[in-house]
Amino acid sequence: MILSVAFSFLFLVLGAALWWILDTRQRKLLPPGPRGFPIVGSLFNLGTLPHRTFHDLSNKYGPIMSLRMGSVPAIVVSSPEAAQLFLKTHDSNFAVRPQMEAVAHMSYGNNGISFTNGTYWRHVRKFVVQELLAPAKINSFQGMRREEVALVVEEIKKAAVAGEVVNVSDKVGSLIENMTFRFLLGRSKDDRFDLKGIMTEAFTLAGQFNLADFVPFLKPFDLQGLTRKYKESSKKLDAMLELIIDEHEQNLNTGNNRDIVDEMIILSRNDSSVNHRELAKLIDRSSIKSIMIDIITAAIDTSFTSIEWILTELMRHPSAMKKCQDELASVVGLDKMVEETDIPKLEYLNMVVKEGMRLHPIVPLLGPHEAKEDIVINGYHIPQKSRIIVNAWAIGRDAKVWGDKVLEFIPERFAESKIDLRGRDFELLPFGSGRRGCPGMQLGLLSVQFVLAQLLHCFDWELPLGKSIDDLDMTEQFGLTIPRLEHLLLVPNIRVKAA
C-alpha cells in the first residue's frame, strides 16, 4: 500500500516536471502570457468577468497574449493593430470556429451561421446575407417596426400620465422581441412560449466557460452541471421551434411578403433560385432551426443590451442627453415621431451610439476563432488549433487610440473621427470583422438607432424619486453579451404628442 502511494506520488511529480519542461520550451515561441497550472492552465483565474481579467493581463503581457485554457492554447488579442492581423491580414487562417459543447447541444450540431465551418457555412452565409438579411428585405419590414415602436410609446405615455416608474429594460426587451417575432415568424409575440426568456437562458449558458471544452477528459463528469442545463434548454428550444415550423408548413406563404421561416422552408424544398441550389441540397429541418436560433440570438439580447447601456450612460450624462434631444427636435420636429429615414441625419445620436458601443460592446469577447494551420505573427508562433479570443471590450479602452479620458462617456470624440463601427476600422468592433463578421449588422444597428431615437424624442427621462445618478448600478452580468445586472427604472415625461 505504502509502495503504491509512493509510486503514485512519484508519477505525479515526474508528470508535473515534464509538463513544466515542455511548457517552458513551447512558451519561448509563443506570445508572452501567464504560465497557469498543470492540466487546467489559467481557467480558474478568469473570474466572473473574463473580458476584464483578459484586459488586466494584456496590460502586463501585451496586446497579443498567450495562455493555456486547459489543454487548449489560447491567444488573446487586445489592440486594434493586433485585431487587424488576425481578422484581416491573416483572416483566411482564422475563419474557423472551434467546436464547443454548448453549440453542439443548442444549435443542432453546428448547422447554423455562427459556428458552422466549411462549404456548408459559405453557402448558408451567402443565403442569409443575400436573402434573409438583405437591405431590401429589412426595408420591407419598416412599417412593422414603426407599428411596434408606436405601441410601446403609447404604453409609456400612459405610465407618464399616471406618474409611474417604467421598467425600461422590460419595455425595450419586449419591443425587440416583438419586432424579431414579426420579422422572423410573421406575427407578434406568441403567449404559448416565452421566446425572450428561453433565448436569454440559452444565451447565458452559452456564454459560460465550460471546463469540458478545454479539458476534454472531464466531459463525462459534467462537473459544472452545464451539459444537463444545455440539454434542458435545448429541449425547450426544440419544442418551440418545431411548433413554429409545423405551423408555417401548414400555412406556407409563397407571396412577396414572406417571413424568414417561409423563405427557409421554400429553400429546403429545393424550390429556390439558382444562386442557392447548392445550399438547398444541404438544408434540412435541423438547419432551419439552427439558423432561426442564430437570428433570434443576434437580434434580441444584442440590441436590447446596447439600448439599455446607452440610455444608462445618457442618464449619467445629462448634457449628452440634451444634445441628442435638441438634435431630434431640430431634425424631426416636436409634432411627429422619428422615422427610419431620419436616422442618417442624426449625427450626434450616431456619435452617442458609437460611444455607447465602445464602452459597452455588444459582445465583449468576439465569437472565438481557431487557427487552421500553424502560423507566425509578429515573430510569435501561433499553433494550429489555437483558440483566438478578440477582446472588443479591451480594444474600446485602448488609451493609445482613445486618449487619457478613455473611461469617460464622450460622444464628441467621434465628431472629427472617421472611425466606423461596421468592421472596417479595428478600433471599434461591436459587430466583429472579416469573414466571420456579423451578417445581421445592418438590422442590429438600425434597431438600436431607431428605438433609442424614439425613446429620446418622445420622452424626457428622470430617475425615480429619491434616486441620484450615483445610484445607477453599472454592474455587468457576463454571458455572450454583458447586460446590466439591475434593470433600468426611470420616470417618463411626454415630449411629443403625436403617435
Image (cartoon, rainbow, N blue to C red):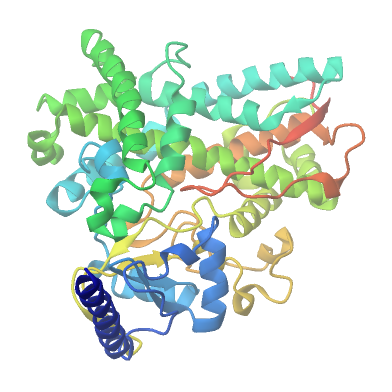
* Residue 385 versus residue 184 in the image, above or below: below
**447 with respect to 9 (left or right):** right
Residue reaching furthest to the top: 250
* Residue under the image location 74 percent in, 46 percent down: 473
Task: Decide if residue 256 is in sight here.
Answer: no
In the picture, the quarter occupied by the C terminus is top right
Is residue 403 at least partly visible in the picture? yes
Left/right of residue 3 with respect to residue 296 in the rendered view? left
Across and down, in percent, residue 42 comes to 42, 69
Q: Position of residue 13 (x, y in %)?
A: 29, 81
Q: Residue at x 41, y 53 (%)?
A: 209
Q: Choose between 162 and 427: the one closer to the eye.
A: 162
The answer to whether residue 42 is above or below residue 22 is above
Between 400 and 26, the residue placed more toward the observer is: 26
Q: Residue at x 58, y 42 (%)?
A: 305
From the viewer's perspective, is 284 left or right of 439? left
Q: Position of residue 265 (x, y in %)?
A: 20, 23
Q: Residue 52: where, in percent of width, then height?
A: 57, 64
The furthest residue to the right: 466
Nearer-the-camera pick, 289 or 217: 217
Using the image, determine if residue 286 lies above or below residue 331.
Answer: above
In this rendering, the count of numbered labels is 0
447 or 113, which is in the foreground?
Answer: 113
Position of the N terminus by quadrant: bottom left
